[in-house]
Image (spheres, helix red, strand yellow):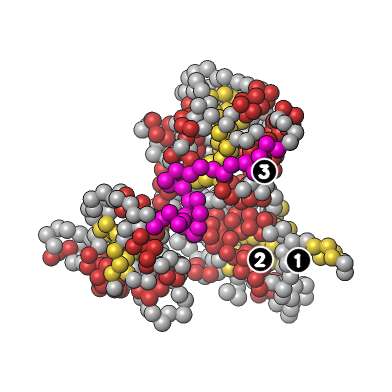
C-alpha cells in the first residue's frame, strides 16, 4: 500500500494480471489536476499510515478555491481499519463534510469525474470485485474508479492489498501509477500545485459536491424540504415490517431501546426496490423520526405490533429475539407453505435456541445478523462492526461527560492545563473507534492489544501503542479479526503488570477486550483501582467505561 511496503518502487509483483504499467511523475499529475474541473479523491489505509491527510486537504482546498474545481472525497465503508476511519482523518484535516461522500453516492456519478486520485487504496478499487467470479473478493462492493475519465494511483509499489489479490486497475489504459513514499509525494504535489495555480482565490469557497438521488444533502438522515415531493414507486410485492422497539417487550423497561430497524431514507429505498413497508406507530419516535416522515417515504402506519406481524412477510428487529416474537409470528403450518421471515441480531445461548426451535416449528425463518461471517463480500451485512464503531465513539463521549476536566490541553492566564490521558484496552473495531474519538478531542491516547499486529493501526491514528513485554505472545491473532485468549502464566503476569502501571496514570480507561463465545477476560482488578493497596491507585475522579460488560466485563467492579 501507499507508504507501507518496502522494496522496489515500480516492480510488478508478478501475479496473474498481465499488462503494461503507465507511470507518471508529480509534475505531470499537477498538470492534470490543474486542467480537471471535477476531481475525485479516494483515500485508503496507506494515507492513514503516512498521516498525510492534512496535505491532502490542502491540495483539495487549492483545487477548489484557486482553480474553481469540484472536489469530492469518496469513502469506502471499510477503507482503513474500521468503519469511519477515513472520515475521522479527513475531519481532523478540516475537510468540509459536504464534499465527503459515501461509495454509493460517488458510484452514481463516477463517469462524470475528469480525474480520480487513489491514495494508498487497493482492494476497495479493484475491478475484480465485479468482473471475476473466481476471485476471493468477487461480490465485494468497490468504488468504481476505473470508470472515471482518468485515474492516477499513488502507491509505493505494485504489491497487493490486504486480500492478496492482484489489481487490474494498475494496468488499465486510463490508469497511471505514481510511485513513491506517501508524505514525500503528497508534499511535492501540494507545493508544485500551489506554485502553478493563481495566487488569489478565484472563488470564496469551492463548489460543494453535487449529489445524485442517493445522496444525503441536508438534514437528519438526508431528509430535506424537497422530500415532501411524492415519488412514484414500482408495484409492491412482499411487505417488510418493523415495530416500536422501545415498547415491544416491556413498555416499563428501565433501559429504553432507542434504535429503529428502518429509517425514512431506507424506507424509500425499500419502496423503490418493490417492497411494501409497514410500521408500528411511534417506531421511530425514540430515534427522532416522526410517523409522518415514514409516510412521506411511502410506508403504511399500523396501530400495533400485532398488526405488523399479521401483515408483514419480513419483520426487521433491532433487539434480540424474545417470547413476543414467537407469540406474534404467523404460523406457517396454516398458510400452505407461506412462511414469515424474522431478521434480528442476537447472541446464541440456550434460551435463544429454545425460541428458535419454537419458531422453526411454526415454519418461521430466522436470520441472525450476528452470524454473518466477517468476509469482504458480506461486509455490507456486518451490523456488529457498525454497532461496535458507535459504541467506541460513545464510550469516549460518556467518559468525558463524567470526567471533571476537559480533554484537550489549554493555556489560560492562570497556567497550563495538560491534555487528559486515555488508555484503550483492546483495539478491535470498538477500540479503534475509541482511539480515533479520543484523539480527535485532543487527549493523549494510549492503546494496547495482545496482537502486536495492531501496533501500526494504533500509531497510524496518532496514539501510542503500549506493548506487553513478554516472549510468549504467539497465537494471539485469533480468527475473523478477533483476538484469542493467551493462557501462558508468564504472559498473564506481564499483561496485568503493564495494565496496572497504565491504569494508575491515566484519566480514562476504555475496556473493549472480548473473545467470541467466551466470557470477557478480567484485565482491570480491584487492586488497580482501590486505595487500600500499597501501590498508588487510579487517580480520584478517573473514569472506567467497560464495553465488555455484557460478556462479564473486563473490569472486576463491573
Ranked by sequence position, the earlier of labels 1 and 3 is: 3
Give the left or right position of residue 414, taking residue 163 as reference: right
Q: Residue at x 46, y 23 (%)?
A: 16
Seen as rendered, the residue at the extreme bottom is 252
Q: Which mark is residue 505?
A: 1
Quadrant of the rendering where the N terminus is positioned: top right
Cα gap from disc 1 to disc 2, whole angstroms = 10 Å
Q: Magenta residues?
A: 201-228
Judge by depth and name the residue closer to the eye, 391 or 268: 268
Q: Residue at x 20, y 62 (%)?
A: 363
Give the left or right position of residue 105, taking residue 87 as reference: left
Q: Which mark is residue 464?
A: none
Which residue has dot 3 on it? 204
Label 3 SS: loop
> Is residue 208 magenta-colored?
yes
Which residue has dot 2 on it? 509
Indicate whether 206 appears above or below 112. below
Q: Find residue 276 and report its horizontal and vertical position in percent.
A: 27, 57
Which-is-in-front pick, marks 2 and 3? 3
Amino acid at each position: 500500500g501507499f507508504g507501507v511496503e518496502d522494496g522496489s518502487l515500480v516492480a510488478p509483483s508478478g501475479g496473474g494480471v498481465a499488462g503494461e504499467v503507465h507511470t507518471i511523475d508529480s509534475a505531470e499529475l499537477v498538470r492534470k489536476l490543474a486542467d480537471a474541473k471535477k476531481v475525485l479523491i479516494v483515500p485508503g489505509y496507506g494515507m492513514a499510515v503516512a498521516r498525510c491527510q492534512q496535505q491532502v486537504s490542502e491540495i483539495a482546498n487549492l483545487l477548489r478555491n484557486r482553480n474553481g474545481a469540484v472536489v469530492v472525497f469518496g469513502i469506502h465503508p471499510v477503507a482503513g481499519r474500521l468503519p469511519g476511519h477515513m472520515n475521522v482523518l479527513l475531519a481532523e484535516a478540516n475537510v468540509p463534510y459536504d464534499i465527503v461522500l459515501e461509495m454509493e453516492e460517488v458510484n452514481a456519478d463516477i463517469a462524470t469525474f475528469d480525474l480520480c486520485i487513489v491514495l494508498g487504496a487497493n482492494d476497495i478499487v479493484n475491478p475484480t470485485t465485479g468482473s471475476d467470479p473466481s476471485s476471493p473478493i468477487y461480490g465485494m462492493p468497490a468504488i468504481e474508479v476505473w470508470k472515471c475519465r482518468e485515474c492516477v494511483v499513488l502507491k509505493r509499489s505494485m504489491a497487493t492489498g490486504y486480500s492478496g489479490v492482484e489489481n487490474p486497475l494498475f494496468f488499465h489504459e486510463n490508469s497511471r501509477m505514481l510511485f513513491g513514499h506517501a508524505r514525500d509525494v503528497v508534499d511535492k504535489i501540494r507545493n508544485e500545485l500551489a506554485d502553478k495555480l493563481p495566487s488569489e482565490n478565484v472563488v470564496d469557497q469551492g463548489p460543494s459536491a453535487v449529489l445524485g438521488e442517493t445522496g444525503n444533502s441536508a438534514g437528519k438522515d438526508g431528509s430535506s424540504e424537497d422530500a415532501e415531493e411524492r415519488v412514484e414507486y414500482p408495484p409492491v410485492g412482499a411487505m417488510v415490517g418493523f415495530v416500536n422497539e422501545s415498547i415491544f417487550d416491556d413498555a416499563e423497561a428501565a433501559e429504553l431501546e432507542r434504535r429503529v430497524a428502518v429509517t425514512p431514507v431506507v424506507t424509500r429505498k425499500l419502496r423503490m426496490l418493490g417492497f411494501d413497508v409497514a410500521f408500528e406507530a411511534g417506531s421511530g419516535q425514540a430515534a427522532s423520526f416522526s410517523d409522518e416522515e415514514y409516510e412521506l417515504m411511502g410506508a403504511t402506519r399500523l396501530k400495533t405490533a400485532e398488526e405488523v406481524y399479521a401483515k408483514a412477510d419480513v419483520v426487521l428487529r433491532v433487539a434480540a429475539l424474545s417470547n413476543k416474537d414467537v407469540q406474534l409470528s404467523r404460523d406457517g403450518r396454516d398458510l400452505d407453505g407461506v412462511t414469515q421471515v424474522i431478521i434480528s441480531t442476537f447472541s446464541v445461548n440456550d434460551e435463544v435456541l429454545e425460541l428458535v426451535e419454537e419458531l422453526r416449528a411454526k415454519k418461521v425463518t430466522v436470520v441472525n445478523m450476528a452470524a454473518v461471517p466477517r468476509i469482504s463480500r458480506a461486509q455490507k451485512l456486518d451490523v456488529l462492526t457498525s454497532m461496535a464503531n458507535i459504541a467506541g465513539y460513545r464510550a469516549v463521549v460518556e467518559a468525558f461527560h463524567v470526567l471533571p476536566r476537559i480533554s484537550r490541553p489549554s493555556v489560560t492566564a492562570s497556567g497550563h492545563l495538560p491534555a487528559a490521558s486515555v488508555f484503550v484496552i483492546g483495539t478491535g473495531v470498538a477500540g479503534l473507534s475509541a482511539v480515533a474519538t479520543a484523539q480527535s478531542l485532543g487527549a493523549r491516547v494510549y492503546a494496547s492489544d495482545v496482537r502486536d499486529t495492531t501496533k501500526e493501526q494504533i500509531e497510524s491514528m496518532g496514539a501510542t501503542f503500549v506493548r506487553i513485554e513478554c516472549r510468549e505472545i504467539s497465537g494471539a491473532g485469533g480468527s475473523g479479526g478477533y483476538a484469542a485468549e493467551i493462557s501462558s502464566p508468564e504472559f498473564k503476569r506481564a499483561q496485568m503488570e503493564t495494565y496496572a502501571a497504565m491504569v494508575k496514570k491515566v484519566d480514562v480507561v476504555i475496556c473493549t477486550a472480548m473473545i467470541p463465545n467466551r466470557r470477557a477476560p478480567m484485565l482491570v482488578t480491584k487492586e488497580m483501582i482501590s486505595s487500600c493497596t500499597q501501590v498508588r491507585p487510579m487517580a480520584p475522579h478517573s473514569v472506567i467505561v467497560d464495553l465488555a460488560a455484557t460478556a462479564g466485563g473486563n473490569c472486576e467492579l463491573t
